[in-house]
Image (cartoon, coloured by chain):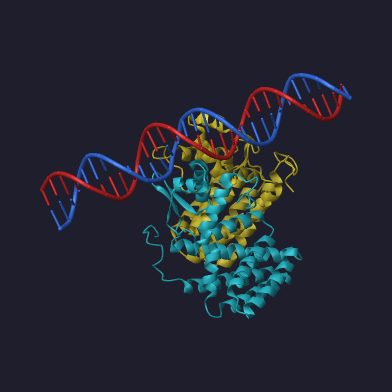
Chain colours: A cyan, B yellow, C blue, D red
DNA sequence: CACCCATCTCTTGCATGCAAGGAACGTTAG
DNA sequence: CTAACGTTCCTTGCATGCAAGAGATGGGTG
């Protein structure tokens, strides 16, 4: 959160552990609910338990792992309710970002959003869902960045990490017709932003988030199934 | 963030350190920018450096301290820009909370808000700013709690901690006429919530936050002064 | 056969020791 | 007197050892 991932030089080894573990969790490389042994990770990275332990502490604050004292550390498994809450926050923050960006007027991010949509149009046209998924991520990131509020950006990233969003996007885009619809909604939002109509931009953006959430939920396996065997998910 | 403060029993000593340090920073007991020595704190709490160190790690993720590698750990000093950003987020989240609460309809928090305002009216009437400040904090907390979104609540708390809000409220209430005005705005917001007019509730709540921010900034010492000697405040 | 209890192992929590890197200070040269 | 340099002290980063607690596993009993 504070330092961004980069080269391996000048990066403390615990920063590397944090970046690596975060990537694994977000990408789904490690399953939700899976136990993370300090010792095993330490051996794997060739370091002692200490930096691994401190990495866990930070990942816990970010909401990615859960440390149960004297028991173990586990990858967080968001309950259904939490997922709903996370999307509510996503809608809120992205809507606000759209409005803020509209208020800022002509800034570089606008151009980058334009280029993003040009590429996206092409990707949709040739049904390249993989690439389109990346562009969707970039679109939302650009929107947030364009709001020019570092706190909003930081909290947004935390939320997306908890959702393991990159993994989810593809699911929603597998819904028939969703990519085209999504692309259209992006165009509309950008247009309203360019017109400096902040209110409408926020409104449409929020509706877009809700739509994407619906498409996503529809593509999920089964309501009660998944790694949510844990009864703590109230 | 994950565990709430409570009795000293069954609480790991690092949790105690975290709670204590957080309280000190928020209350202003330690000045922004002040160095926090691991060793000194460890001695004071009668523990080793390890739990203090882990506490720092978490407080850093919460944005309350800054760990400069090989140099030291310091209480964060939000730049002027960051304060603006934090208030922007405050406005956003509290506005959303008001709307969400309005949508929820009749819930216990509504009654608690009513009782809060009754007490607040009395406090304002007898010019008890101290007590009113507490009630203001409770009002906003109840609003957030009433939104029934744990993520929103968690992020809100983090933001308020970064603002060292409890300390700021009193400043803003020292503006002449501000308590009465503030109390009125609270009443209006609650009324709109009861009427289930979410849109208006959000709008009025956001305006209220902006007003309180203005009152607060007006009461601050001097724009460029204070512990903000750090030129990083772009 | 089912259930309860003791033990045993694996987990993390904390204490401590050592090393590397900054920053500040005193010193010395110009 | 000023400025540059070398040294010293203080800071955190990491490794390791020990102890306490939770969970699993086995044996014993009703």
Would residue C13 appear left or right of B212 to someone viewing this image?
Answer: left
Q: How many marks?
A: 0
Q: Is residue B124 visible?
A: no
Q: Position of residue C16 (x, y in %)?
A: 48, 28
Would residue C2 appear left or right of B39 to someone viewing this image?
Answer: left
Q: Nearer the viewer, residue A87 or B172?
A: A87
Q: Position of residue A116 (x, y in %)?
A: 68, 70
Report which quarter residue D18 is drawn in.
Answer: top left
Q: Position of residue A137 (x, y in %)?
A: 61, 66
User: In the figure, A40 relative to A114: above or below?
Assistant: above
Residue at (58, 72) in percent of width and height: A130
Would residue B103 appear left or right of A151 to someone viewing this image?
Answer: left
Report which quarter residue B88 is drawn in.
Answer: bottom right
Q: Is residue A81 visible?
A: yes
Q: Nearer the viewer, residue B79 or A199?
A: B79
Report which quarter residue B39 is drawn in.
Answer: top right
Residue at (61, 59) in percent of width and height: B92
Q: Position of residue A132 (x, y in %)?
A: 61, 72
């Amino acid at each position: 959160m504070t330092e961004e991932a980069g080269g391996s030089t000048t990066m403390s080894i615990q920063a590397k552990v944090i970046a690596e573990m975060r990537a694994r969790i977000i990408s789904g490389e490690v399953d939700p609910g899976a136990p993370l042994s300090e010792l095993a990770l330490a051996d794997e990275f060739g370091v002692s338990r200490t930096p691994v332990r401190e990495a866990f502490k930070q990942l816990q604050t970010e909401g990615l792992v859960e440390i149960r004292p004297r028991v173990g550390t586990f990858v967080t498994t968001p309950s259904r309710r939490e997922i709903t809450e996370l999307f509510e926050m996503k809608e809120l923050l992205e809507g606000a970002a759209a409005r803020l960006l509209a208020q800022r007027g002509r800034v570089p991010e606008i151009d980058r959003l334009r280029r993003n949509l040009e590429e996206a149009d092409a990707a949709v046209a040739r049904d390249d869902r993989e690439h389109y998924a990346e562009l969707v991520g970039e679109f939302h990131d650009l929107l947030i960045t364009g709001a020019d509020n570092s706190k909003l950006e930081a909290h947004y990233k935390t939320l997306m990490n908890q959702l393991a969003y990159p993994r989810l996007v593809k699911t929603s885009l597998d819904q028939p017709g969703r990519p085209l619809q999504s692309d259209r909604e992006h165009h509309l939002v950008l247009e309203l932003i360019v017109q400096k109509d902040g209110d409408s931009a926020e409104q449409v953006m929020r509706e877009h988030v809700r739509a994407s959430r619906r498409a996503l939920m529809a593509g999920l396996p089964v309501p009660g199934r998944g790694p949510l065997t844990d009864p703590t998910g109230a």
